[in-house]
Image: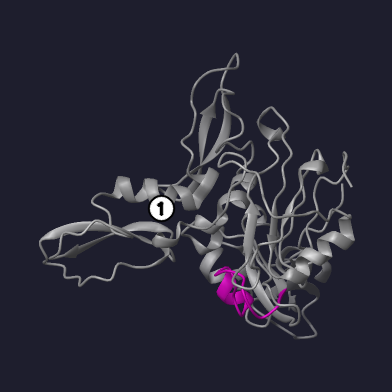
Amino acid sequence: MAGKENIRHFNSHPHACGALHLITRDTSHLVLDSSWNLSKRSHIVSRKRETDYAGSKEFTVTSGMRSAGCVLAICFLTGLCFVSSEVEDSEEEWKTRYAPPICEKPPQVARHPAAKYQLWFYNITATKCELFYTNRLIQHGNIFGSRKSCNKFCRDKHYGMCAYAKNESLCWKRKEPYFWFNPDTKKCELFMYGGCDPNSNVYRKKLACIEECAEFMDEVCNLLIDVGDCIEGKEVRFGYNPPFRACEAFNYTGCGGNRNNFKTAHSCLMTCARDSRCLKHTQENFDFFRLFVTYFYDAMKNECRPTRTFLRKPSGPKYNRFRTKSECQRVCMRTHKPKFTFE
C-alpha cells in the first residue's frame, strides 16, 4: 500500500507496546527493516515531530517498538507492512534516542580526586558529561579531554534535536516568545524566536518542549507520566502532571516508566506541589450541632472527607475546603488519561 493517509497521531495503548506515534504524509516511504533485532532493547526508529507550531508542517514517522509483536500490531492496525533489507535514511531525517555505543560504558580507569589529570566521560544514566580525575592521560572510548568534546560526541548525538542551539536570527517582521530545550540547564526555556529554522529545537508551547525532551530533564517533576511497558499489571501510583500542576493517579503496569512515579498521593504532592491547596490542613469535625458541612482532601488517605463547622468557612484556591465532594475530587483526585487519539 502506498499513498496519502489521514493518520496524524496514534498513541498505542500503553499496556500493549508502549508509546507509539505514526505521523505521515506519504506512506510510500515507510519501510520496516527485516534485520532489526527487537529482542535486545526498544528501538526508536525515528524521533522527529510535527512542526506546524513553528510556521511549517512536516510529517515524518515516529515509532517506539518494544517487541516484534508491536511490529505485527502496526501492520494489522494500519496496513503499513513493508519489508526491505535496506533502509535509506539520513542523519537529518532520522533520529534515534540512543547514545553512540562507546558512550554507554563508563571509563575503566582508576579514579582519584587528587589525581593529576582532569578528564570527562558521558554518564548515560544522568544523561550528561561528568568530570573525573585519574593518573593516566587517556583519551579514547568514553574518555574526553574537555566537556565540549564530550558533549559534541556523546551528549548531542544522544539528545538529537533537543541539543540543537536556539536560532535567534530574524526572518519574520518581529520576534515572538517561543521555547527551546537548553541542553546545558536541561530545562525548557523561553526565548524570542524570529522565525528561522522552524524544524529544530523550537516550540510554540512549553508542553511541546517537555513532551519532546522530558527524558533528558533532571527534575523528576518535569518528567511526563509514563504508565510503563508491561502488558499486565495495574498498580495504582501517582505522578505529577506539569501542565496542570497537580498529582494524578494512574495504573502502573509494573515495569519501565520513569521516576515520576510515587506510591502515595501525599509523597507526590510533598515532592512536586508543596504549595498545593490539597496539602493545606483542615480540621475534621463530626459534631451534629455544627450546622455547615464542607469537604476537604486527605492526602494520606487519598480521599475527600466531610467536616462540620459552626460558621460558614471560606473556600477557594487558598484553602483545602470545598462546597461539594465532587468539587474536591475534581481538584485533588485527578486521574491521568494517557493519550489515545485518532485525528
Q: x, y (%) of residue 99?
A: 47, 57
Corner quadrant of residue 209: top right
Q: Is residue 198 left or right of residue 28?
A: left
250, above or below 275, in the image: below
Going 58% across and 71% down the picture, which residue do you hit?
Answer: 268
Q: x, y (%) of residue 47?
A: 63, 49
84, above or below 288, in the image: above
Residue 245 appears in the picture as rendered: no
Pointer 1: what residue?
A: 154
Q: x, y (%) of residue 158?
A: 48, 53
Of 148 and 85, the residue lying toward us: 85
Of 340 and 95, the residue lying toward us: 95
- Looking at the picture, the colour scheme in use is one colour
Going 64% across and 36% down the picture, which residue do you hit?
Answer: 204
For label 1, the SS is helix
Q: Is residue 295 left or right of residue 136?
A: right
Q: Is residue 208 left or right of residue 99?
A: right
- Report the amino acid beneath label 1: Cys
**What number of labels is visible?**
1
Q: x, y (%) of residue 263?
A: 61, 80
Q: Is residue 301 left or right of residue 116?
A: right
Residue furthest to the top: 173
Going 34% across and 68% down the picture, which residue do you hit?
Answer: 106
| Residues rendered magenta in the picture | 251-268
Whether 174 is among the magenta residues is: no
Going 31% across and 46% down the picture, which residue do you hit?
Answer: 149
Magenta region's main secondary structure? loop
Whether 256 is among the magenta residues is: yes
Residue furthest to the bottom: 287
